[in-house]
């Protein structure tokens, strides 16, 4: 599996994990038993799928998860901003920059 396809899989996994987590979070605070149950179930299924997708690349586990954390951070911040209207603080931006830098080191090293 090439670098580009591996990175796309990790991006998909990040979308699934952050999206599934957002659904679970919404389900926990939803009113109405049916909506709450559906959000929790769909979120759980998506989170299970994430676990399968994130482990599909044949990289070493620690390396895959290290690079994956970058995608998860970026997707989670986008969902926080767009879905929950949470604006990033300066410490979040600085810390996120360090996360991205670490992911570049991991993904570009051999």
Image (cartoon, rainbow, N blue to C red):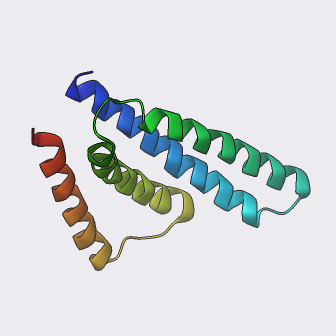
Residue 45 versus residue 33: which sits nearer the camera? Answer: 45
Residue extending furthest right? 33
Which quarter of the picture shows residue 10? Answer: top left
Q: Is residue 49 left or right of residue 5?
A: right
Residue 29 versus residue 55: which sits nearer the camera? Answer: 55
Q: Is residue 78 left or right of residue 51?
A: left
Q: Which residue is drawn at the image coordinates 89% and 59% (left, top)?
A: 32
As displayed, is residue 11 above or below residue 92? above
x, y (%) of residue 65?
34, 48
Which quarter of the picture shows residue 76? Answer: bottom left
Q: Quadrant of the N terminus?
A: top left
Number of marks in the rendered image: 0
Q: Which residue is drawn at the image coordinates 46% and 62% (left, top)?
A: 81
Q: Quadrant of the C terminus?
A: top left
As displayed, is residue 93 above or below residue 26? below
Which quarter of the picture shows residue 21? Answer: bottom right
């Amino acid at each position: 599996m090439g670098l580009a396809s591996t990175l796309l899989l990790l991006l998909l996994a990040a979308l699934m994990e952050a999206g599934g987590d957002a659904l679970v979070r919404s389900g926990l605070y939803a009113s109405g038993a049916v909506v709450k149950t559906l959000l929790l179930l769909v979120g759980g299924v998506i989170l299970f799928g994430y676990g399968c997708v994130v482990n599909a690349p044949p990289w070493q586990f620690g390396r895959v998860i290290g690079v994956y954390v970058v995608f998860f951070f970026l997707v989670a911040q986008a969902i926080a901003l767009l879905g929950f209207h949470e604006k990033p603080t300066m410490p979040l931006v600085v810390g996120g920059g360090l996360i991205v830098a670490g992911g570049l080191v991991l993904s570009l090293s051999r």
